[in-house]
Image (tube, rainbow, N blue to C red):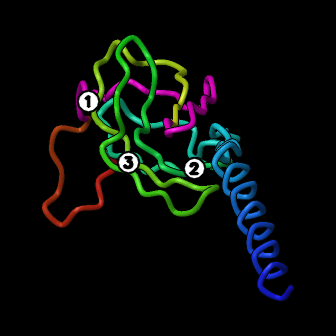
Amino acid sequence: MFAKSFRSLRQVALACLVVLMQAWIAAPAYAQAAPTITSVTPGQGSVNGGTTIVITGTDFINVSRVYISGPSNVNVASYTVDSPTQITAVTASMSPMNVGRRAVVVETSSGFGVLSGAFEVLPALTITGVNPTSGDAAGGALV
């Protein structure tokens, strides 16, 4: 009787194990949400690049690309994912045709986060003249 009960108990245990394994295999994988962007600070920088920006939002996990959209999408020069809610990036030099309000985009394995008009690309500054053209060697002249 003991051997027969043990065999039945073993069969029940194996059957339960098979059912659990099938449920585990059939269970859908956890889907990571696509990122969202809530703010970009500062909201502007020169077309020359070099502006450090802080991007805040959610689900910055497995980030593969950060860029500023425009007539030509421009990857940032560098970025660091500080946390799942913050990225620090440095803008790259851009073509003058990118001047204007642009979207900032964060790309992950789960999708894209886009904040339209989040960053204004400003034209490069141009110095057209200096007045006065000379001054005292000791300094102090207003220019």
* Element marked by disc 1: loop
Task: Give the Cα separation between the discs numbered 3 and 1.
Answer: 25 Å
Considering only order in the chain, which callout, 1 or 3, is on the residue closer to the N terminus?
3
What crowding class fits label 3: few (fewer than 14 Cα within 10 Å), some (14-19), or many (20 or more)? Answer: some
Residue 90 circle label: 3
What crowding class fits label 2: few (fewer than 14 Cα within 10 Å), some (14-19), or many (20 or more)? Answer: many
Q: Residue at x 81, y 75 (%)?
A: 9
Q: Which residues are magenta?
A: 107-130
Q: Is residue 110 magenta?
A: yes
The x, y position of residue 116, in whole percent, is 62, 23
The vertical placement of 126 against 39, above or below, is: above
Q: Residue at x 24, y 24 (%)?
A: 128
Q: Residue at x 48, y 55 (%)?
A: 88
The vertical placement of 114 against 70, above or below, is: below
The x, y position of residue 38, in whole percent, is 70, 41
Considering only order in the chain, which callout, 1 or 2, is on the residue closer to the N terminus?
2
Q: Foreground mark, 2 or 1?
A: 2
What crowding class fits label 1: few (fewer than 14 Cα within 10 Å), some (14-19), or many (20 or more)? Answer: few
Under mark 2, the amino acid is Phe
Q: Is residue 108 magenta?
A: yes
Considering only order in the chain, which callout, 2 or 3, is on the residue closer to the N terminus?
2
Front-lying residue, 113 or 55 = 113
Q: Quadrant of residue 143?
A: top left
The residue labelled by disc 2 is: 60
Under mark 3, the amino acid is Val
* Element marked by disc 2: loop
Q: Is residue 42 left or right of residue 65?
A: right
The vertical placement of 103 against 51, above or below, is: above
